[in-house]
Image: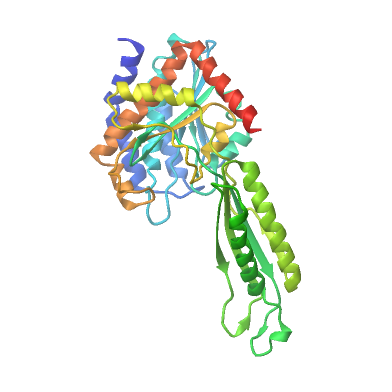
Amino acid sequence: MDAAQTIKSLIEQNIAGYMEIVQTLYENPEIGNEEFESMQLLVDYLEQAGFETEAGYVVPTGFLGTYDSNKPGPTIAFMCEYDALPEIGHGCGHNLIAAIGVAAGEALKAVIDQYGGKVLVVGTPSEENFGGKVSMAEAGVFDEVDVALMVHPGNKNSVGSRSSALMPLKFEFYGKSAHAAHPANGISALDAAAMSYLQINLLRQMVKPHTYIHGIIKHGGEAANVIPAYAALEYYFRAPHMSYAKEVSEKATAMVQGISAANGTRVEISEYECPYEDTVINYKLADILTEKYEALGVADIQAVDETATGSTDVGAVSYKCPTIQGHIKIVPDEVGAHTTEMADATISEAGKAGLIKGAQGIALTALELLENPALLEEVKAEQAETLKNIQ
């Protein structure tokens, strides 16, 4: 049996174990930075599969599974997500992502001794808000990785998409409380917040295309007859690249500081969530995954989506090494992410089929790079050229 057939067969033969992971995570959802049981479940499986493992890797709920052939060759990383959403559970399908990463890693491990190199299965927690991949990228986890791969379930089959850089800022205003009947005795933090909200809204018309500003009044006071001493705004500033997201957020910050001073309040500004880089697209990797999907019988494969809207921490990885986040369809077109329908689909027959095809797709992509070193060099050369043009 050749290596490609070994990979495909192994994933199909072990599907019951992978679906047990999916089911267990579905029944026991844990939100970001609290995924201790989820982490241990995945670590235990990888240990039994012959990986060296480390729990609590870089961040408390992160992990690393390593298999080294002890022969020269590339380092291939498969990424796992496993944080859930409050109330909805695994409405973004991270339980399926985790199993896909484990399955692909185990399958490649079975053949990598023929070629040389190293397989990593990287547990990257808290994607939804706190950016496990950002922490790991900053810690150097992906510095020596040749390619990083993952597949996300959804309502389409695709080979990647751009994402927006995200700068999250919180503006907290501090004034002076007073009875509303004696407003001269107080300083309204809410007035400063409301004026800032309006001014940032006016900034929208002055930004470049594909730049998005959205925010809320997080706190505006406790009672109508009390001048609020505290108010807060939370904002997301998104742009095609982080440099411009920061530029827009800095303009907003200058506006807020001026308004706060004019109102006599004190303002504190902080990053209340983890900033996310935009995703660097590697078209050579996308072409390889397209070819593998087609050979596996995956239908209606969409090319790279060039429209950057949402944000993801995989962007941080894509600045460190060639990276691909493909998609595999498990729900009808009308079903979106962050829904109970998506969560339920992960434990369905469609979820099982998506797990098999997704894991096979990225494992076979990795195999292609092991078998064809020149192709890997093309992938890395494209990465270097793209980063040079961005920076």
Q: Nearer the viewer, residue 208 or 144?
A: 208
Q: Residue at x 69, y 70 (%)?
A: 174
Check the picture and name the quadrant holding the C terminus: top right
In the image: residue 154, left or right of residue 16? right
Q: Residue furthest left?
A: 349
- How far across and down, in percent of the image, does residue 234 sit? 58, 60
Q: Residue 209, image x and y in percent?
A: 56, 47
Q: Nearer the viewer, residue 2 or 304?
A: 304
Q: Residue placed at 38% from the left, 20% from the top?
A: 364
Residue at 46% x, 45% y: name it.
35
- Which quadrant of the rendered structure holds the N terminus? top left
Q: Is residue 199 above or below residue 359?
A: below
Can you tell which quarter of the image residue 171 is in? bottom right
Q: In this rendering, is residue 361 above or below 208?
A: above
Side of 51 relative to 272 (left or right)? left
Q: Residue at x 73, y 62 (%)?
A: 257
Q: Position of residue 222 (x, y in %)?
A: 57, 77
